[in-house]
Amino acid sequence: MAEPILKVASLTKCFGGLTAVDDVSFQVAQGEIVGLIGPNGAGKTTLFNVISGYYAPTKGSVVFQGADIGGKPPYHLAGVGIGRTFQVVKPFAGLTVLENVVIASFLRHPKRADAERQAWQVLETTGLADRAHVSAAGLTLAGRKRLEISKALALEPSFLLLDEVVAGLNPTEADRTVELIMKLKEQGLTILIVEHIMRVIMNISDRLVVLNFGRKIAEGTPAEVCGDPQVIQAYLGEAAA
Amino acid sequence: MELLPQALTDGILLGGIYITIAIAFSLTYGVMHVIDFAVGEWIMFGAFTGFYLNKWTGLDPFLFLPVIFVLYFGIGYAIQPVIHRVLSGTKGNPFLMGLVFTFGLAIMFRGLALTVFGFYSNSIPSMFSEGSFNLDQLGITVTIPAVRLVGLCYALAITAILHYLLKKTNFGLGVRALAQHKDAAGLMGVNSKRTGSYVYGIYVGISAMTGVLLGCILSIGAQMGNEYTIFAFFVVVLAGMGYLAGVPWAALLLGMVQSIFMIYFNPSHTLLAVFVILYVILLISPRGLFGKGV
Amino acid sequence: MKTTTGRGPAFLAFLAVALLVLPLVMHDTFVLRVLTEGIMWVGLAIAFDVIAGYTGYLNFGHGAFFGIGAYTIAVLMMQANLPFALALPAGGLAAGIVAFIAGVPTLRLKGAYFAIATWALSRAIQQLALNLDFTGGPDGMRLEAFLNPQFFYYLMLITVGLTFAILWYLLERAPFGLKLKAIREDEEGAKALGLNPTKLKMQAFILSALPTGILGGIYAYWITFIDPSSTLGDLVSDQAVVMVVFGGMGTLFGPALGAVLIFAFKTIFWAYLSDFQLLYLIILGALIAISVIFIPNGLWGTLVRRKADRPRPERAPAAVVAPEEGN
């Protein structure tokens, strides 16, 4: 089997007395979509923050494409090929949609003209090209989530961390986002996705990793995970298990 | 070397007063998330109000401290909605705009003070101004001017009241909740606008009162605001921004630095020393001496 | 600032020519001096905006760089006998070095620390100048008199013109400006896009300091007398803040406009109301406060917004062949 693109080994992250991520280990293979699920407060976003360089691991390691990236700053990781979206979308409000993406394009295309060209292409892919000159502050939530994805895509990543890109969207918008994600997978992107909308994450994920209280409690295909009593207990409580 | 105990004593006496300002200032930052560049100006206005009240009524300034508090509480309470509006703005960066706004206020106040009060230095006389105690223990003699001691007592009393207010009342609970998590506190029924007004009013009132104390102990002048603003910043950054428990230590340190410079070195170098210490702290431990700043 | 019509550049060209030709036509040295100072303020304001408006980091002690430049020139020329041509770049360099030293501890922290520390630094530097012997203490320093209004006018004009052009390129054409704005809008998010905020902030800060130091140096030689209150006092910093906030942060034309208007106001004010100089300070402060409340984007920003609200045709570059997305 080929070397996994991401290897998380015994990863622990503590904040003072609080252990947000507790001895979590899993791997993601090239080209997979792995879903990260778990009740609120399970540590999913913290895990994302460690993988994307916003937090340094307290213990354990994160190995990306064979290199240990624990503790490296986010801007280094962007260069290495990790892109991410944020759960609370914060576009660069004072700038236009195009400018938002161009800033990300600068990573691979230092010249303004090249960056703009690539940004347009990304906007075409994500369907925001018609709103390119609109101020980012004027976008709807759906637009902003698309913009988040656009910015991450402009980095030309090999690995994408998607944090609740579907939450809050109406079913039509959600479906279009799912289409986009599947298209990205076809293009060879590896994706680690956090999502609460079960029908979405069950359908698109090749495998799932389930967290609860910072620990991994299950891992496997969606079918396997659904039947796991621990998972059911975590979501629905004792009685349902 | 024989002067060291005196320097330390002076430092404690002065530092105790700085505690009061710094706690109010830090609290305001914690609740309203605004760094008030006008803090020194509030102190200055309080000092001048005390000066003129004393001049016109002949009453000892320590007696009308509560009056000063009420007056400036009112002013602060009235101004806060404007600050709140600036900080709630959707355009640009509200925090930045808040900084600019208080900076503008500071300039305006300084100009006002210079216009009305001129460039002269003065000091507020008080019944305590002449008296002093001498402590003779263990072969060390230390002179404690009465006015500084009374000033310290007053400042500690204010701090104690503030502490009680914050820890033991519902209002204080709301304030602390607001400082920790504005939205959650709002959902629990804490009115952020009104609580913010109270906090800002209390802070301005306390600053003004402390100005009177400092005016009795040291001096007053229309330009004194600058110095005290830097002092307030110093204490708050050293303590850790928003970390109230660190304030007493940082305030005492400031008092020490000031006293040591007054006794051993050139007092006008105090500002330089304060800045150097601030700079070094920011280099090694930006979250304050205790590492608990925000 | 994309100008959609040809009128903008044409106006600028006309202005440039007019300014260049002026001393040949106008022989009133008073007017020349006023213009020289006005041009200087334009330079100060746009330099300040690099760190304040574009990057979103407020340096309320910007005037310190001006004073550092002035004093460096004075000391180098009067005590080391350096010629002006060598002393001037040294003045700019000194300001840049101080920016670097001040920036190291503060730029990796949040904006609040930066505002506090830089403001305190400017107060401390003034104290330094007041207390050191070789800076002349409160009496200041005198430079060798070189009275040539035309020389200083052109020097100021060329310096500010060059500064404007360089900043225009760096901030509006090159990626640098957009990256700074990204940091201003969302510093944490910008990191995920490959931007190193501390490095960029430092570059912006030094970039704001260099021209300011040079302008201070020119000022020192021009006025031939400097002292802590005129070059290291509050007024330079305060006026820079007003000009930028009132004019419009985050652009180059905003601060330029603000500088022209505020300077014009100041000149008229001090000419006719010199008894009320302190009133000027009150007005400055009030202007800042009012601008923040009512025109947070400044005059220029508000004007531009009005233009932008009018519908513009959307266009994509011809090179992109776009498959139709079902919208």
Image (spheres, coloured by chain):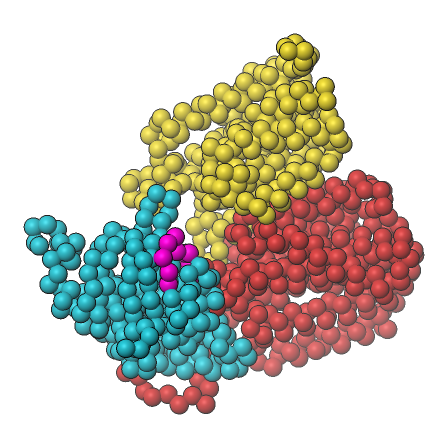
Quadrant where the N terminus of chain C lies? bottom right
Q: Which chain identifier belongs to the red chain?
A: C
In the rendered view, tell whether residue B241 sits above or below residue B134: below
Colour for chain A in the figure: cyan
Q: Position of residue B100 (x, y in %)?
A: 56, 49
Q: Is residue A54 magenta?
A: yes
Q: Is residue A175 left or right of residue C57?
A: left
In the rendered view, tell whether residue C168 sits above or below residue B8: below
Q: Report which quarter residue C313 is drawn in.
A: bottom left
Q: Is residue C94 left or right of residue B60?
A: right
Q: Report which quarter residue A82 is drawn in.
A: bottom left
Specify whether residue C13 is in view. yes
What secondary structure predominates along the stretch shown in magenta?
Answer: loop
Q: Report which quarter residue A197 is drawn in.
A: bottom left
In the rendered view, tell whether residue B136 sits above or below residue C244: above
Q: Nearer the viewer, residue A39 or A136?
A: A39
Quadrant where the C terminus of chain C lies? bottom left
Colour for chain B in the figure: yellow
Q: Is residue C159 left or right of residue B25?
A: right
Going 39% across and 52% down the picture, which residue do you hit?
A58
Going 28% across and 77% down the picture, which residue do you hit?
A1
Q: Position of residue C146 (x, y in %)?
A: 91, 60
- Counting every numbered tag in the picture gives 0
Going 22% across and 60% down the picture, which residue do you hit?
A210
Q: Is residue C22 magenta?
A: no
In the rendered view, tell whether residue A223 sits above or below residue B169: below
**Residues shaded magenta:** A53-62
Q: Position of residue B262 (x, y in %)?
A: 72, 27
